[in-house]
Amino acid sequence: MTMTPEPRRWVDEDPNTLPDEFAAGMRGYRELGPDAEQSLRMWQQLARTVEPASSESLQPSAAASGVSLAKRMSWGLLLTAVAIAGWWYATPVAAPVAVPGAGPSHAMPVAPLRAVPVPPAARATGAPSTPPSAHVDAEASQPASEPVPPGKSQRDPRFAGRAAHPPSTTTPVASDPAAEVALLTRARRVLYSVPARALELTEEHARTYPHGTFAEERELIAIDALINVGRTAEATKRGRAFLQMYPHSAGVDRVKALVGVP
Amino acid sequence: MTPPVTAASVPEFRVLFATYAGFVWRVLRRHGVPERDLEDACQEVFLVVHRRLGEFEGRSTLRTWLYAIAARVALGQRRKAHVKHERLSYGEHDAAFTEQPQAATQLDSAEQRQALALVEAALQTLDPDQREVFALYELESMTMAEVAGALDIPENTALYRLYAARDKLRAYVKRRSVAVPALREPRRAAP
């Protein structure tokens, strides 16, 4: 699956998920960097290597005084730029992806909270199947064999929502990366202690998210679990299918080792 | 005003340094370069950048390209440190990471420093793989494609690590908030 949704940034997602202090610490982290003195020292060292070459190749005839004046003047610019670099990062420089509400953020020195607050009531009353409101209605009125197209869920601002407890019902959900990861993490945790349970959880994932984002990770866990419960023939079969399906997976070596493929 | 060093899409080296020094600095820190070596390492990165600017083809973004260079320099630094002084065993690598917040901060208030220390301590509880994805996406505001490109992993893998990291951090924050009352009541209590 190549279409991975761009999740909302954590600080934007839900003001209640993160304590204020943690959010403040994250903003503070973005300002880490060399101080003015360190920047100056580094640049002076760099300039020794860099400047002669570049001024030579660019302007061999430039008057010495002119060059040094230009250097002097650009110093102020450089230091200012270092000082503002912090918030420069906060707005993705080369990012082609449109971030909702990114426009006005230039006015602020650090990444502003772009959260569009979701009314708490909408969340509190949410059914166990994760995407609330519109999706639930749509699914309820349609046969279960028609899952919500992925594109639709991507536009939902709550899409990347919460690591809510995964639904215990088996109503298929298009994709909910956070909940999927939570479910698969649970499976991974018991992979060696209670492999049968891990296997059950992977099956739950397959049922709940037939079009989920992390089928690859699920298969990895399932193959491991099958071996751990002694169902090696099945593991081998599924492992081979995995290798065909995900030849570039980070888990290829692991699966090869598990199912005995050279 | 001097013309750009190479192609029009690549900013002048001076601007590049001013813009990305902080980014490179943070990458080096996360990759275990001790505070005292950061300046040297950062300088080294930009020397490499300058030397190889002509090779930058725009197939990746500048940041992913810089990331790859910084990560390699950090690895080299750690090796050098290891060979020279044997001062960075794996355990000490972690220690170097946690000891840093006080020294490196230019944040003015004690509260800000404390908040930063909390975040760095929390990052320290993550697996390195998850930490890097989280840092690049949530702290450096990269796009998911950039993160995947910088770390040379599939986007789905990056996404998975991001959510796993968030889960762990949520749990960490929760544990901490039980232990540290100040965290539990970040705002003044309502009457």
Image (cartoon, helix red, strand yellow):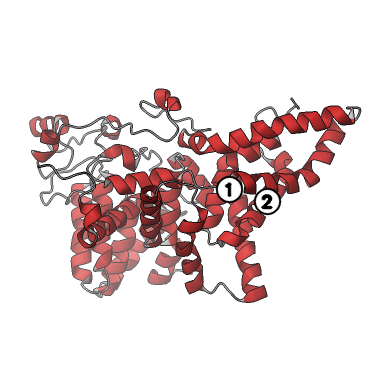
Q: Residue A196 in the image: x percent, y percent?
A: 19, 69
Residue corresponding to mark 1: A34
Left or right: A107 as drawn, with respect to B69: left
Q: Residue A58 in the image: x percent, y percent?
A: 83, 30
Q: Amino acid at mark 2?
A: Gln
Left or right: A177 as drawn, with respect to A112: left
Residue corresponding to mark 2: B43
Q: Where the N terminus of chain B falls, by quadrant?
A: top right
Quarter of the rendering containing residue A119? top left
What residue appears at the point 32 percent right and 42 percent down from the top-left corner? A10
Q: Residue A131 in the image: x percent, y percent?
A: 18, 38
Q: Nearer the viewer, residue A177 or B77?
A: B77
Callout 2: 10 Å neighbours few (<14), some, many (20+)?
many
Left or right: A119 as drawn, with respect to A255: left
Instruction: Decide if residue B58 is in sight here.
Output: no
What residue appears at the point 65 percent right and 29 percent down from the top-left corner? B9
Q: Residue B64 in the image: x percent, y percent?
A: 56, 44
**Marks 2 and 1 in Cβ contact (< 8 Å):** no
Q: Nearer the viewer, residue A136 or A145?
A: A136
Q: Amino acid at mark 1?
A: Pro
Q: Label 2 vs label 1: CA separation?
A: 11 Å
What residue appears at the point 91 percent right and 27 percent down from the top-left corner? A61
Which element carries disc 2, helix, strand or loop? helix
